[in-house]
Amino acid sequence: MWPASLPNRQGREINERAALRGGPFAVAEEIFVVLTVAVFLSPLINAAPVLAQRALDAQSINNRLINADRDRRKQQPLNAIRTCDEVIRTAPNTVKAYLIKAQCFLDLRQKAMAMSLIQQALKIDPRSAEAHLELGRWYRHERKDDQAMAQFEQAVKLDSNLGIAYHAIAALAEQTGQKEKALAAYNSMVKLEPQTQTNYVLRGDFLRRRAGHLVVVRTHSS
């Protein structure tokens, strides 16, 4: 007979199949199959609520990061920092939280703290394109243009779809007189996001500035 631990309905089914196939060995075989399936499915069933909670937590974290970035852009860095700290306590490996917090401290001119946070982000994920982009911004604040450009280019190398990194390259290249590199970066922005009108405006403004510069140069040289 089937063990008392098995549900009544399941036990009756086992006994009926065993009776058709004959003998207690058939019963044992059926029980083995049932228990094997139960053992296999149990971790999956138990994990379902945990996975759902993790998904919920991930959405909550993402919403908090959006709020933190919004506060930073609204020049409310202390609010943004508090929100990032909440995220870091919940999920200490969230790179984006460190980077938003670093931007806030950079806005507050606390450069050493900003660098420390960027380094923590890179320690968590050395291949984070956004972390390399933020490190480049830090170098720009320090007027270390070569180091800044190297980090911007590394960001693009790691993530060729990071449009803001192309903008950083274009702005720095134009500022340092690298007109062709600037134009290439603006072209990359347009190619990456052809539906974004701002990219065309930025490229057009650059071309007008370059054309005006060429006219001035030719006038002085003639």
Image (cartoon, helix red, strand yellow):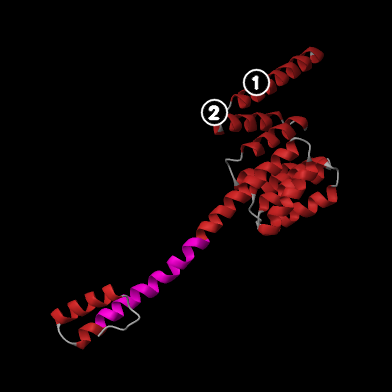
The residue at 72%/32% (across/down) is 171
Q: Closer to the camera, 220 or 91?
A: 91
Left or right position of 149 against 22: right
| Residue 10, picture quadrant | bottom left
The residue at 58%/52% (across/down) is 58
Q: Position of residue 153 (x, y in %)?
A: 67, 43
Residue 44: in magenta span: yes
Q: Quadrant of the N terminus?
A: bottom left
**How much space separates mark 1 and mark 2, taking CA atoms?**
14 Å
Q: Position of residue 150 (x, y in %)?
A: 71, 45
Task: Kindly identify which residue carries mark 2.
Answer: 194
Number of disc labels: 2
Left or right position of 16 against 205: left
Q: Closer to the camera, 152 or 74?
A: 74
Q: Closer to the camera, 180 or 149?
A: 149
The crowding category of the residue bearing disc 2, from other C-alpha atoms within 10 Å (few below 14, some 14 to 19, many at least 20), is few
Residue 3: in magenta span: no
Whether residue 147 is visible, yes or no, is: no
Q: Is residue 63 above or below residue 179?
A: below
Left or right position of 191 against 16: right
Q: Is residue 47 above or below residue 166?
A: below
The crowding category of the residue bearing disc 1, from other C-alpha atoms within 10 Å (few below 14, some 14 to 19, many at least 20), is few
Task: Kindly identify which residue carries mark 1.
Answer: 204
Q: Position of residue 76 (x, y in %)?
A: 78, 39
- Label located before the other in sequence (1 or 2): 2
Q: Position of residue 168 (x, y in %)?
A: 70, 36
Magenta stretch bounds:
29-50
Amino acid type, callout 2: Pro
| Residue 11, picture quadrant | bottom left
